[in-house]
Amino acid sequence: MSGSPDDDRLEELREKKMQQLREQAGGEGGGQANEAAQEAAREQAEAKQEAMLKQYLTDGARQRLNAVEMSKPDFAESAKKQILALAQSGRIQDRIDEEQMRDLLKELQPDSKSFDIRRR
């Protein structure tokens, strides 16, 4: 990673959690070990996703995405996946700022359903 203090701290926390999961897996049955491994893999994937988002989003854009996540977690998750896909395909040249994030969220937002009520 970039070697910033936050990244170093994140890596340190990841290692501690992995060690705890290994210790728990050693003391418990085989089913528990598999479950712990899956949990560790999921946490590692989430940490990787957050690190990539931190790399490609400005603070304002991350705040906007977090605000969306509080109200619409499913929509925010699909937006995160879309941003990561754009980043991995090389279509993001610079960091996404708050204005660009707003536009991206508008594009990803599903069409609102309208109801036409007519009285007879």
Image (tube, rainbow, N blue to C red):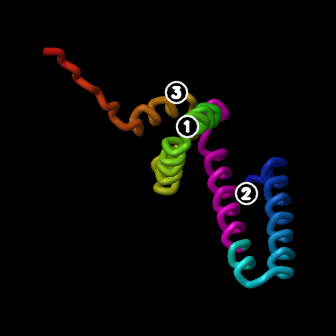
Q: Is 114 rendered above or below residue 52?
A: above
> Which mark, residue 109?
none
**Image quarter for residue 63?**
top right
Q: Residue at (81%, 71%) from the top-left corner?
A: 21
Q: Magenta stretch?
A: 37-61
Q: Nearer the viewer, residue 97 or 34?
A: 34
Question: Are discs 3 and 2 less than 8 Å apart at CB?
Answer: no
Q: Which residue is mark 2?
A: 1
Tell me what residue is drawn at x 48 percent, y 54 percent. Answer: 85
> Considering only order in the chain, which callout, 2 or 1, is on the residue closer to the N terminus?
2
- What amino acid type is highlighted by mark number 3? Glu
Amino acid type of the residue tagged 2 in the rendering: Met
Q: Which residue is mark 3?
A: 99
Image position, residue 120 (x, y; %): 13, 15
Other residues around mark 3 within 10 Å, as few (<14) / some (14–19) / many (≥20): few
Residue 47 vs residue 16: left or right? Answer: left
Q: Nearer the viewer, mark 3 or mark 2?
A: 3
Task: Identify the main secondary structure in magenta.
Answer: helix
Residue placed most toward the observer, 38 or 99: 38
Toward the viewer: 118 or 20? 118
- In the image: residue 74, left or right of residue 11: left
Q: Which mark is residue 96?
A: 1
Query: Relative to 73, does residue 51 appear above or below in the rendering?
Result: below
